[in-house]
């Protein structure tokens, strides 16, 4: 029975990679075409709808096959905001954005420019209006514009996935704090916990984890920068919020690597 389960899980893992190998280029090509022919507002709606449905279907497949036990109910509280917010999760794995965008499709993700410029991957993200990190100054300029238009921004304050040897998370970069200062936008911490290091920084695509994967998303209280706080002080206060929360006893609390 164990052998059957082992090979079945390997098969499902490979099918997951095949799923992305098919859908990512297809959505990218569709996004590139729609970007050229649709008005900007309609293009943004189409892009976010396409990505949301793609991500939702993938999450559904993971659940129905028993590979994933997901608690993401709190993410629904982040949808439908009329005022700007910055959604700021810790970054545990390569696919964190999949789960968040599946529940919060209006979120404008700040992501690596190399992904957005990739013809096989970036068309859908460009159609959805995601912001590339090609240069910090340009990224901040675009992000400020979106926040002043009362959009929802998704930005990982660690800047990259949590390193293997980090206890809870990497030291925070200053981008989120700087945006909060320039736009007076509340930062909403999102705490991601998991029983696995699957797709963490350095995890090979071909390495099978132990299934089922258990992932939990919880949403913290909005945090505003104080008038008398520097960007560095605000970033340090944010970091303490993450450290205090992620260190709490929890069934999915991060376990140090052996």
Image (cartoon, helix red, strand yellow):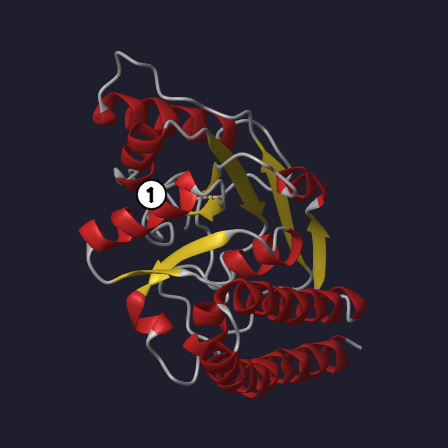
- Residue 36 placed where, x, y %? 45, 81
User: Where in the figure is residue 130, as x and y percent of width and height?
Assistant: 43, 61
Q: Residue at the spot x=45%, y=28% of the render?
A: 186
Question: Considering depth in this image, is 181 or 188 the residue closer to the camera?
Answer: 181
> Which of 159 and 41 lies nearest the eye of the viewer?
41
Residue 217 in the image: x percent, y percent?
61, 43
Asked which quadrant contains residue 101, the reply is bottom right
Residue 196 x/y as whole percent: 55, 55
Secondary structure under the numbered disc 1 in the rendered image:
helix
The residue that mark 1 highlights is 144
Residue at 77% in and 66% down: 66
Tell me the quadrant of the picture where the N terminus can be found: bottom right
Side (left or right) of 42 relative to 232: right
**Which residue corresponds to the image point at 50% horizontal and 74% vertical from the top-left?**
124
- In the figure, 149 relative to 38: above or below? above
Displayed quadrant of residue 99: bottom right
């Amino acid at each position: 029975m164990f052998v059957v389960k082992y090979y079945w899980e390997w098969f499902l893992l490979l099918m997951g990679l095949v799923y992305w190998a098919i859908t990512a280029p297809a959505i990218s090509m569709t996004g590139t075409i729609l970007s050229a022919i649709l008005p900007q507002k309609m293009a943004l709606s189409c892009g976010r709808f396409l990505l949301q449905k793609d991500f939702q279907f993938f999450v559904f497949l993971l659940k129905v096959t028993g590979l994933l036990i997901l608690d993401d109910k709190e993410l629904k509280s982040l949808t439908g905001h009329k005022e700007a917010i910055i959604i700021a999760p810790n970054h545990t794995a390569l696919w964190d954005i999949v789960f968040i965008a599946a529940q919060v499709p209006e979120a404008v993700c700040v992501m690596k420019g190399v992904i957005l410029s990739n013809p096989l991957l970036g068309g859908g993200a460009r159609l959805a209006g995601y912001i590339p990190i090609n240069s910090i100054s340009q990224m901040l300029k675009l992000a400020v514009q979106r926040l002043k238009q009362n959009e929802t921004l998704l930005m990982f304050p660690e800047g990259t996935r949590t390193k293997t040897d980090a206890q809870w998370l990497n030291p925070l970069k200053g981008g989120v704090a700087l945006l909060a200062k320039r736009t007076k936008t509340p930062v909403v911490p999102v705490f991601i916990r998991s029983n696995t290091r699957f797709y963490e920084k350095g995890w090979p695509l071909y390495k099978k984890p132990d299934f089922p994967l258990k992932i939990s998303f919880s949403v913290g209280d909005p945090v505003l920068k104080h008038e008398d706080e520097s960007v560095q002080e605000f970033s340090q206060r944010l970091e303490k919020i993450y450290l205090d929360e992620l260190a709490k006893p929890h069934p999915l609390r991060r376990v140090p690597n052996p």
